[in-house]
Image: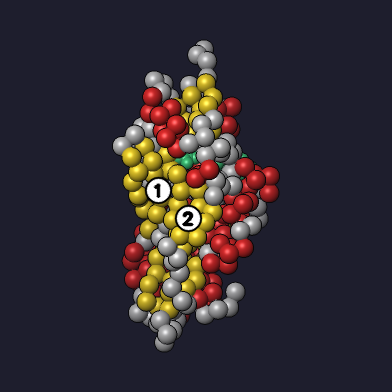
Amino acid sequence: MSEMLSEAPKSLADAVALLAGANGAARVLAGGTDLLIQMRSGRLQPELLVDVKGIPEMRSIAAESGGFRFGAAVSCMELVEHAAFARTWPGLTDAVKLIGSIQVKGRATVGGNLCNASPAADSVPALIAAGAVASIVGPGGRREARVEDIATGPGKTSLAKGELVASFLLPQRAPRSGDAYLRFTPRTEMDIAVVGAGVNLTLDAQGVCSQARVALGAVAERALLVPQAAAALIGSKVDAAALERLAAAASAACRPIDDKRGTKEFRIKIAGVLARRAAAIALARARGKN
Ligand SMILES: Cc1cc2nc3c(=O)[nH]c(=O)nc-3n(C[C@H](O)[C@H](O)[C@H](O)COP(=O)(O)OP(=O)(O)OC[C@H]3O[C@@H](n4cnc5c(N)ncnc54)[C@H](O)[C@@H]3O)c2cc1C
């Protein structure tokens, strides 16, 4: 059995050099709430762990360009306790709040939630609906990618060797905007989404929806952006008919698997129901009612 090395670099450049220079399997270690479990079960045996929690850029939450940038290694608890962030992005905050127990949230990160690439990851549909952009650093320098382009399938991402997600940028909020995330689980907590739905919308001064993004989790091999569902809302007053069209478009976009936690038919139906309910919450928030 080969030895495993563990490094804790203090800069992004050093982290990238370690990841890019590794001969065998190398993994970023953030909170470890997915990775350590996979290693303990024998599913993964990396030769190098690169602990990124000591890298300042990956641990900060700051205002930027009228929006927020937060580090990929900020813990879920730090994010949900950031009052200005939670006020601006209540739906994304709800999604992050759902990740495990208080203890898990004290360690777990949004970067890890995304890069673990589970189709059921709770923060990912909410990030996609929010229009979050990831800043990725690697041997070729820095690049940006939309969150919906990072996970490609269960356990797989579009990150190249040596690349890591450094931070996420949430855009400036237009007035009369609201977001929401809902998930269905058989238990009330500490469970994985059978379906998740994130909706983010903006109303114009007349109360007509001028912009919307809708994303679904656990209904395909990765979280899905569903432009057809957003199109059902845009140009409407988000009335009952628009919500029905949204639900139908959300259900139509699903390509789920059957498993012990839910059948295909059940997931397809619930995706429509959750998208409709999340849109109603996002609408109330956009109207200033929480
Ligand atoms: C009891 C329990 C309950 C849970 N409940 C939920 C839940 O309700 N909802 C949910 O979505 N998840 C849940 N999880 C899963 C897990 O907590 C989350 O996915 C968490 O966000 C993972 O973050 P982490 O920092 O611990 O990631 P890690 O375990 O450190 O990393 C996960 C993967 O991502 C990679 N990675 C991490 N950060 C980066 C980065 N910045 N750049 C590139 N790659 C990176 C790692 O190499 C690894 O492959 C639960 C886990 C436990 C143990």
Q: Earlier in the sequence, mark 1 or mark 2?
A: 2
Q: Quadrant of residue 81?
A: bottom right
Q: Residues within 10 Å of mark 2 (few under 14, many from 20)?
A: many
Name the amino acid type tagged 2.
Arg
Q: Quadrant of residue 205?
A: bottom left
Judging by the rendered image, the residue that carries numbered circle 1 is 135
- The C terminus, quarter of image: bottom right
The answer to whether residue 132 is visible is yes
Residue 162: x and y in percent read: 38, 32
Going 50% across and 71% down the picture, which residue do you hit?
178
- Residue 198: assigned label: none
Residue lying farthest to the bottom in this orientation: 206
Question: Where 230 sits versus 94, above or below?
Answer: below
Residue 152: x and y in percent read: 36, 44
How far apart are labels 1 and 2 at the CA level? 10 Å
Going 46% across and 48% down the picture, which residue do you hit?
167
- Residue 69: assigned label: 2
Q: Residues within 10 Å of mark 1 (few under 14, many from 20)?
A: many
Name the amino acid type tagged 1.
Ser
Going 52% across and 19% down the picture, which residue do you hit?
4
